[in-house]
Image (tube, grey):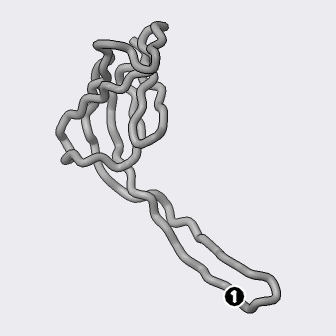
Amino acid sequence: MKAIFETGGKQYYAEEGTVLYVEKLDAEAGSEVVFDRVLMANGVVGRPYVNGASVKAKVLKHGKNKKIKVFKYNAKKNYRKTQGHRQPYTKIEVISVK
């Protein structure tokens, strides 16, 4: 069973057993989440979503990605600003696609 689902403004391709890093979810580690915004399931394309389709996943952990540097600069104005950012994520494992 294969599916493409949407969460956090992004689309993810999933099969059973797939481990994905998605935008941070409000769910505790060890709990199960269900994604019902499925765009495609087993070759059936939705308009925009497939009716009755869902992706069930288990939350493995929460964390933050590596730090990136944001550097702002204006030429000839003596303006420089450095800032760091770490994007939070949730690691999930897909249990089933229906």
Residue furthest toward the bottom? 78
Residue furthest toward the right? 76
Residue in the foreground of this view, choosing between 97 and 7: 7
Residue in the foreground of this view, choosing between 30 and 54: 54
Pointer 1: what residue?
79
Q: Residue at x 67, y 85 (%)?
A: 80
**Residue 68 horizontal side relative to residue 41, left or right:** right
Residue in the foreground of this view, choosing between 80 and 56: 80
Q: Position of residue 34 (x, y in %)?
A: 25, 29
Q: Is residue 86 above or below residue 71?
A: above
Amino acid under label 1? Tyr
How many dots with numbers?
1
Q: Residue at x 48, y 12 (%)?
A: 45
Residue furthest toward the front? 47
Q: Position of residue 66 (x, y in %)?
A: 50, 61
Q: Residue at x 40, y 28 (%)?
A: 18
Residue in the foreground of this view, choosing between 25 and 66: 25
Dividing the picture into quadrants, the one containing residue 20 is top left
* Image quarter (top left, top right, bottom left or bottom right) of the N terminus: top left
Q: Residue at x 20, y 34 (%)?
A: 32
Q: Position of residue 57 (x, y in %)?
A: 28, 30
Q: Residues within 10 Å of mark 1 (few under 14, many from 20)?
A: few
* Image quarter (top left, top right, bottom left or bottom right) of the C terminus: top left
Label 1: element kind:
strand
Dividing the picture into quadrants, the one containing residue 38 is top left
